[in-house]
Image (cartoon, rainbow, N blue to C red):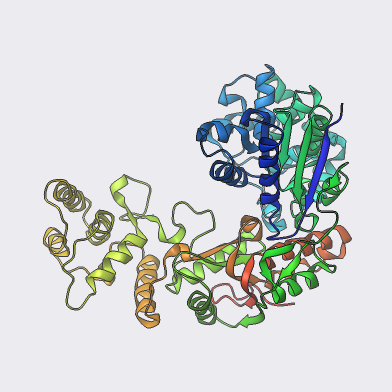
């Protein structure tokens, strides 16, 4: 038996995920399917969580959230569950090893030390395909990345040279006999009974495990690896129907072996019959820029809105900051952020530091700790006790109140009060006493007022007297100055600086897309495959914009060679 395959093809903002959810509803309402008859998969955990949330809201509002989450997961997670259901892998978390995870480090270290190869537990291959970051990896980490790539692409160890080239790695590995090493690594993992992520997917393929449900949905299919594709094709032979959605123009994970050809070669009937759906996101001028980048029409028609597309050069940090502030003022509200997107993580770090040092708060797209405006260490600046940390943004909020004229009388939130005490008190002992008094006051005698804190601290609280690193103090001072100048407050989450890869699947009213990186790719772009992928990466960045797109070059004051145009 071979199941029917239905394929949705649509560009950015076309509503592909909604099409899949409509198919879910059709399976439930017409064919009488229940939740256990369905399995929804996507490329990343964030996308899978979004599927689960939308499924709970629209199709199964009365189902338990945990039950829905079990039916929505990444392809890897579903493969792991399938292996465990058939007794191929036990349920011990120690069996799954991931680079950088503490419990897995001894496994990697033992193998590399045995073979006398340098390895770092913290060095990782960048998720944005950054060839510079890759070139700096220790030999052991490079070998592991090659091994993972070979497994995901279903190639033997003998193909390591081609894998290294695809990953942007270049080193003389003949001294270690990499083919033998890669084979030894697989044998070592088997002897230990441990699996990396591609290993259990390969186990699922080799063991021909049973599919998770009679009806399968796969979102963002253009991002699947050859190994994941092989597993889904196996399941197609055993299920009733498989629904897939994707866009070949957004296939940007070539460094993981992904290819748009996998999506296009599926034996599927196109539900949309080759039509170009209208984008709910991208207006005409943004889409014109996007199609110029691609070199061909996209799989979506533009939204009727005209939109804005600009090309700018910011000669200094101040010009960049002013443009971001203008974007916030013009295109967003208090909830929706502006995106500043870069091709590589090294550029993200530099722009984020430049914006923060100029007093403009910003974070990464998936930043949970606040980035440069989150927790920082004080005192000796080393990792000591919890009380030796201060939240920079909470401190900014407290100082903003303190600068009021006349001084404010309203109470302070506890987080702001703690930040004010922690940042102002120099002595560790006095800081501990003040924080203890603060917590007692907050518990027994609320509210907390500025006067209470100045009494405990026994000194006037000023920005220049903060017990923080000079760079952080300057960052806070500049932030307060800029707030007074622009006359509105910018929360750190209002400006998101990150890579194009991190922004995939998301949108913002205004996107500033850094293009200065292109000067470093001229040689690499000679290769047709590399050129095609870079066009797609650029296309994804452009199409995150729903109102305005600003393509920019930028000369950093701290890194003068950064971002120079070709």
Tell me residue 387's x, y (percent). Answer: 28, 48
Q: Is residue 112 visible?
A: no
Q: Is residue 15 left or right of residue 360?
A: right
Q: Quadrant of residue 80?
A: top right
Task: Point out the image quarter for the N terminus.
Answer: top right
Viewer-closest of 196 and 265: 265
Question: Residue 158 appears in which quarter of the rendering?
Answer: top right
In the depicted structure, whether residue 62 falls above or below residue 345: above
> Which residue occupies the foreground of this view, 99 or 410?
410
Check the image and report above or below for 271 versus 449.
Answer: above
Name which quarter of the figure residue 235 lies in. Answer: top right
Who's the residue at 32% across and 62% down the image? 468
Q: How many numbered marks, from 0 up? A: 0
Q: Is residue 332 left or right of residue 396?
A: right
The vertical placement of 545 against 59, above or below, is below
Residue 293 in the image, given as x and y percentages of width and height: 78, 70
Q: Looking at the image, is 238 positioned above or below residue 523?
A: above
Residue toward you, 79 or 315: 79
x and y percent of residue 164 in the render?
Answer: 80, 47
Residue extending farthest to the top is 87
List x then y, in percent, for residue 57.
54, 45
Closer to the camera, 93 or 338? 338
- Quarter placement of the C terminus: bottom right
Q: Residue at x 38, y 82 (%)?
A: 485
Residue 480 in sight in this render? yes
């Amino acid at each position: 038996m071979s199941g029917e395959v239905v394929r949705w093809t649509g560009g950015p903002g076309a509503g592909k995920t909604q099409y899949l959810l409509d198919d879910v509803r059709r399976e439930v309402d017409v064919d009488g399917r229940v939740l256990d008859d369905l399995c929804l998969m996507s490329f990343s955990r964030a996308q899978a969580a979004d599927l689960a949330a939308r499924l709970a809201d629209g199709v199964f509002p009365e189902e338990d959230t945990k039950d829905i989450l079990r039916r929505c997961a990444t392809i890897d997670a579903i493969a792991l569950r399938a292996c465990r259901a058939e007794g191929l892998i036990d349920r011990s978390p120690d069996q799954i090893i991931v680079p950088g995870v503490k419990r897995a480090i001894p496994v990697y270290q033992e193998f590399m030390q045995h073979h006398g190869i340098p390895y770092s537990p913290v060095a990782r291959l960048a998720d944005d395909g950054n060839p510079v970051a890759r070139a700096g990896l220790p030999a052991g980490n490079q070998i592991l990345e090659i091994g993972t790539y070979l497994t995901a692409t279903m190639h033997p160890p003998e193909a390591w040279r081609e894998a290294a080239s695809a990953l942007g790695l270049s080193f003389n590995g003949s001294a270690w006999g990499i083919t033998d090493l890669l084979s030894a690594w697989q044998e070592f993992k088997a002897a230990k009974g441990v699996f990396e992520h591609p290993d259990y997917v390969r186990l699922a393929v080799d063991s021909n495990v049973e599919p998770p449900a009679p009806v399968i949905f796969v979102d963002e299919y253009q991002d699947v690896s050859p190994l994941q594709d092989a597993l889904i094709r196996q399941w197609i032979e055993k299920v009733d129907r498989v629904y897939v959605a994707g866009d070949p123009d957004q296939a940007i994970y070539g460094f993981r072996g992904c290819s748009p050809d996998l999506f296009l070669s599926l034996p599927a009937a196109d539900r949309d019959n080759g039509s170009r759906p209208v984008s709910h996101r991208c207006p005409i001028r943004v889409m014109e820029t996007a199609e110029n980048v691609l070199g061909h029409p996209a799989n979506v028609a533009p939204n009727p809105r005209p939109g804005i597309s600009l090309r700018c050069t910011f000669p200094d940090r101040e010009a960049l900051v002013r443009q971001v502030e203008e974007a916030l003022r013009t295109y967003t509200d208090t909830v929706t952020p502006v995106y500043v997107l870069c091709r590589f993580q090294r550029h993200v770090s530099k722009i984020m530091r430049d914006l923060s040092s100029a007093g403009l708060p910003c974070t990464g797209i998936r930043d949970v700790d606040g980035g440069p405006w989150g927790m920082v260490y004080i005192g000796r600046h080393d990792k000591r006790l919890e009380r030796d940390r201060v939240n920079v943004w909470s401190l900014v909020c407290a100082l903003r109140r303190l600068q009021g004229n006349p001084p404010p009388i309203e109470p302070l939130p506890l987080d702001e009060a703690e930040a004010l005490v922690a940042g102002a008190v120099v002595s560790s002992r006095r800081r501990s006493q003040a924080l203890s008094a603060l917590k007692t006051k907050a518990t027994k005698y609320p509210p907390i007022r500025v006067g209470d804190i100045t009494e405990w601290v026994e000194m006037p609280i000023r920005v220049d007297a903060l017990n923080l690193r000079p760079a952080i103090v300057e960052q806070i001072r500049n932030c307060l100055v800029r707030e007074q100048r622009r006359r509105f407050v910018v929360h750190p989450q209002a400006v998101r600086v990150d890579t194009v890869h991190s922004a995939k699947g998301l949108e913002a009213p205004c996107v500033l897309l850094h293009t200065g990186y292109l000067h470093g790719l001229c040689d690499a772009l000679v290769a047709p495959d590399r050129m095609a992928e870079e066009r797609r990466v650029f296309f994804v960045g452009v199409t995150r914009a729903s109102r305005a797109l600003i393509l920019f070059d930028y000369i950093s004051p701290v890194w003068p060679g950064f971002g120079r145009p070709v």
